[in-house]
Amino acid sequence: MPKFGNLIIMQTIGTTFKNIREERNLLLEDLTKKTGISKAVLSRIEMVNDCQLENR
């Protein structure tokens, strides 16, 4: 499990990433095509908040 400081950074990145994606009306599939990063990885980046909260 990441240290607390790293967790805050990961949560901030995930939230920011998802907010920008939604503001631009992009689906994860759209980003996969544009970046070459798999949908699973992009989803995990966005969901770090939910996963970490569930594990507490």
Image: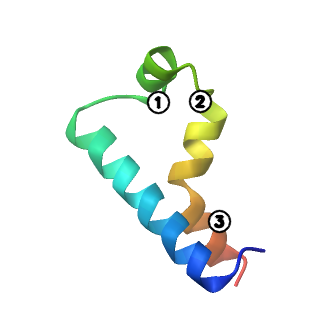
Residue 37: which numbered mark, if any? none
**Disc with the residue nearer the chain's start (2 vs 1):** 1
In the picture of the structure, the residue carrying the numbered disc 1 is 28
Q: Residue furthest left?
A: 23
| 4 vs 11: above or below | below
Amino acid, disc 1: Leu
Q: Quadrant of residue 54?
A: bottom right
User: Which quadrant of the figure contains the N terminus?
Assistant: bottom right
Q: Could you tell me how many numbered marks the image carries?
A: 3
In the picture of the structure, the residue carrying the numbered disc 2 is 39
**Disc with the residue nearer the chain's start (1 vs 3):** 1
Q: Are marks 2 and 1 in contact (CB under 8 Å)?
A: yes
Q: How is the image coloured?
A: rainbow
**Disc with the residue nearer the chain's start (2 vs 3):** 2
Kind of element beneath mark 3: helix
Marks 2 and 1, Cα distance to the nearest angstrom? 6 Å
Residue 27 spot, x, y in % from top left: 39, 28
Residue at figure coordinates x 21%, y 42% from the top left: 23
Estimate how packed mark 3 is, as few (under 14), some (14 to 19) or many (20 or more) residues with alpha carbons within 10 Å. Answer: few
Q: Residue furthest top?
A: 33
Please state if 38 lies on the left or on the right of 1 as rendered.
Answer: left
| 34 vs 11: above or below | above
Q: Quadrant of residue 24?
A: top left
Residue 17 spot, x, y in % from top left: 39, 48
Residue at figure coordinates x 32%, y 29% from the top left: 26
Amino acid, disc 2: Lys
In the picture of the structure, the residue carrying the numbered disc 3 is 51
Amino acid, disc 3: Cys
Residue 43 spot, x, y in % from top left: 57, 42
